[in-house]
Image: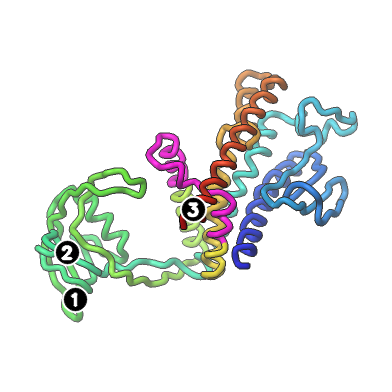
Amino acid sequence: MSMVIGIVVVLGVLIFFHELGHFLCAKAFGVGVEKFSLGFGPKFVSKTVGRTEYCISAIPLGGFVKMVGEQPDEEIDPQDVALSFTHKPVGQRMLIVAAGPLFNFFLAILIFFFVFGISGLMVLQPVIGEVKTDSPAQTAGIQPGDRIVRIGDEPIENWSEMASVISGSSGRALKVLAQRGSDRIDMRIVPEKQSLENIFGEAQTRYVIGITAAGETTTRRLGPVDAFKESMLRTYLITKLTIVSVVKLVQGTISVKTLGGPIMIAQMAGEQAEQGAVNLLFFIALVSINLGILNLLPIPVLDGGHLMFFSIEAATGKPVSLKARENAQKVGIILLMMLMVFVFYNDIMRIVSG
């Protein structure tokens, strides 16, 4: 039951915000909107306000905003020309199309801002959990339970700060001040270069001293300004990681078997819903960023494909021919269908093997 509720909440919020971006931007530029739909197929609920029909439809795997004059070959009543999407300047059309994915990023920022503002930021403390045998840390005398207070002239408040100083040492000896019970101990540690695997399984060299975290955390309360900064940073880091992951998929560094579809999203949404509202909100933000990036890919039928056509129009001064767009969109549909089949296959194989 939690899986059903989770996927309904996740998809509903993501689709609504994506289409809301298109809708609000279209309205801002004076484009008439004929339909705002969450889902496809038969309508469950429908209400017309002014010119626009708002509806919730049976298949919750997407949504759409139908605008006046959306198709170049569409017949338009002369009195509706001023409301026509096609008759708007190319720059405005690009903004209307881009607004959907951009609202996905805005949703992530909004969620992170809300969570950080209410719950604060969980910070991993610089407390030693394990000291590896024959490591620089063991040689220097560091013990489990020690809290790193200072490295050189840098005060250390969290594990991330400590790791950054160590990895940036270039192998230079570090003067470390540690708290052990009521005592403070000065130590000299020389980080060593090691070849480690990153999250993509690639080997990279890094300076380390051979310690792991004890896992102690504290919650740091954030004011509105700090919460906004942290939400922007978190959105940026996830966006960067996602883009790098897409590149690694294309390069073959990451297996395509890691791709997941609606079934995996439903399972994960259910799991996060069971763990609490904050976990579910973070999951929605993560998926929203992924959806925004996916829609910006230059694949015909996606928003990125439309932006590609409009970019060509802006550069050449004339729109891409209708025939060329139709052919490209057919290819785009085939590619998306192949992707959907593949991710469904991956999801099913995970269930069978798991």
Is residue 29 positioned above or below 113 on the image? above
Location of residue 311 with respect to 215 vertically, above or below: above
Question: What residue type is disc 3 on?
Answer: Arg
Q: Which residue is mark 3?
A: 350
Mark number, residue 214:
none
Q: Which residue is mark 2?
A: 176
Q: Is residue 263 magenta?
A: yes
Does the image show residue 217? yes
Task: Report the amino acid beneath label 2.
Answer: Val
Alpha carbon separation for disc pair 1 and 3: 46 Å
- Side of 256 where 196 appears, left or right: left
Q: Label 2 to label 1, Cα distance in Å?
A: 13 Å
Q: Quadrant of residue 75?
A: top right
Q: CA distance from mark 3 to mark 2?
A: 47 Å
Q: Residue at x 71, y 20 (%)?
A: 323
The residue shown at (46%, 50%) is 238
The mark nearer the N terminus, 3 or 2, is 2
Which residue bears the numbered disc 1?
A: 180
Viewer-nearest residue: 242 or 326? 326
Residue range in magenta is: 240-269
